[in-house]
């Protein structure tokens, strides 16, 4: 089969001919139909984070495809089922986090396209217990971005505790942000989209944002404040300065939800404002298998729209350059 392989951290991704993997105990073999390009895949290829993947490896954690074969003891899915391979490749299933609905915090988890080979390939093996069924009403092309960008922003809005009628500011309108706008609307919030590109702000408006703010030409703290301030600020950008601006745009009792992962991972928060203003800072990682099932159900019901463009796996390095240059309206999806 053909697979996109990272030969060394920081090097160009290579398209290689490699053996089709065999599913082991509790695993399924999935023939890929679509696989999204997430910024996390680029971080993985570059070795940007403290815990680094071991090359050679195949990235990809927005994979959607058909189960072709099951390994010994795999009983949850059968050949012919269409499933999604998400970031949470597997978790232990018996720790405190797994047992209380926080499997994404499991310290024994293994992540697709990072700790194990992912979905940038014609075939991938995955844990039978952790792939998620894709409803018939959701196309494979749409399901791919929903498998990470969707479930990550859905979870961020969910843990924010947003209430109908409150105001949510979404900082960074792109692959994740365009979905965050829609989830905030689905939760009943008034939405403010914040970005530095007019085209992305127009996209936010098209997807239901009530107001938009261009942070390149306007002070976002002042602009959001003029709109009454935010009860919730979801930050998807990768600049510590944006996190600080988002915090400063909160009303009293507001909640800052941190999702983006800047290379410079330190931000400055005024303690007096945090305490006297009764504000909260929340870290939100990707959602659980149930969260992803809920994301698929919302999409099947017509409540969300995925903005993405199709690409060929052969063009993976060009696609990475497009993402890094900010030339992608929302998401890129490799189709097979």
Image (cartoon, grey):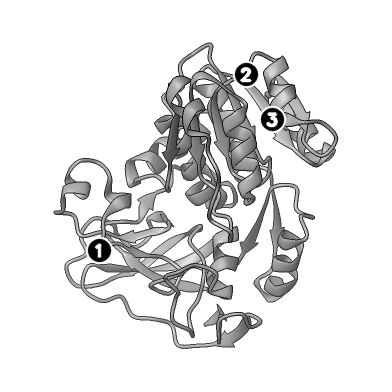
Q: Is residue 214 left or right of residue 182?
A: right
Residues under numbered marks 1 and 2 in contact, where contact means CB atoms less than 8 Å apart:
no
Q: Position of residue 266 (x, y in %)?
A: 53, 52
User: Which of the 4 quarters of the picture holds residue 241?
Assistant: top right
Q: Looking at the image, which residue sits at the far front?
A: 272
Q: What residue is disc 1 on?
A: 108
Mark 1 crowdedness (10 Å alpha carbons): few <14, some 14-19, many ≥20 = few
Q: Is residue 55 above or below residue 161?
A: below
Q: From the viewer's perspective, is the residue at label 1 or at label 2 nearer?
A: 2
Q: Is residue 189 left or right of residue 222?
A: left
Q: Residue at x 52, y 82 (%)?
A: 1
User: Which of the 4 quarters of the picture holds residue 108?
Assistant: bottom left
- Secondary structure beneath disc 1? loop
Q: What residue is disc 2 on?
A: 229
Q: Is residue 162 left or right of residue 7?
A: left
From this viewpoint, is residue 181 visible?
no
Mark 3 crowdedness (10 Å alpha carbons): few <14, some 14-19, many ≥20 = many
Q: Position of residue 258 (x, y in %)?
A: 50, 42
**Disc number for residue 193:** 3
């Amino acid at each position: 089969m053909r697979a996109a392989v990272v030969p060394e951290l920081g090097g160009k991704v290579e398209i290689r001919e490699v053996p089709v993997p065999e599913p082991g105990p509790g695993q399924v073999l999935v023939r890929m139909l679509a696989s999204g390009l997430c910024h996390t895949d680029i971080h993985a290829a570059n070795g940007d984070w403290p815990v680094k993947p071991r090359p050679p490896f195949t990235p990809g954690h927005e994979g959607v495809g058909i189960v072709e074969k099951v390994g010994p003891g795999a009983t949850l899915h059968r050949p012919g089922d269409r499933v999604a391979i998400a970031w949470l490749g597997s978790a232990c299933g018996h720790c405190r986090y797994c047992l209380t609905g926080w499997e994404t915090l499991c310290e024994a988890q293994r992540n697709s396209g990072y700790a194990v080979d992912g979905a940038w390939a014609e075939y991938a093996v995955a844990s039978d217990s952790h792939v998620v069924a894709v409803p018939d009403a959701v196309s494979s092309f749409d399901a791919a971005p929903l498998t990470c960008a969707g479930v990550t922003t859905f979870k961020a809005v969910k843990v924010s505790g947003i209430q109908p009628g409150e105001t949510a500011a979404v900082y960074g309108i792109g692959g994740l942000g365009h979905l965050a706008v829609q989830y905030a609307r689905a939760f009943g919030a008034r939405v403010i989209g914040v970005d530095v590109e007019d085209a992305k702000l127009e996209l936010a408006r098209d997807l239901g944002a009530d107001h938009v703010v261009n942070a390149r030409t306007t002070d976002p703290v002042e602009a959001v404040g003029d709109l009454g301030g935010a009860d919730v600020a979801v930050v998807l950008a990768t600049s510590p300065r944006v996190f600080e601006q988002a915090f400063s745009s909160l009303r009293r009792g507001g909640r800052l939800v941190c999702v983006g992962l800047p290379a410079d991972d330190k931000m400055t928060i005024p303690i007096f404002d945090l305490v006297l203003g009764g504000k909260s800072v929340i870290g939100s990682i990707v959602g659980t298998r149930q969260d992803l099932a809920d994301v698929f159900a919302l999409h099947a019901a017509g409540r969300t729209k995925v903005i993405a463009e199709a690409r060929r796996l052969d063009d993976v390095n060009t696609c990475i350059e497009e993402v890094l240059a900010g030339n992608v309206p929302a998401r890129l999806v490799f189709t097979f």
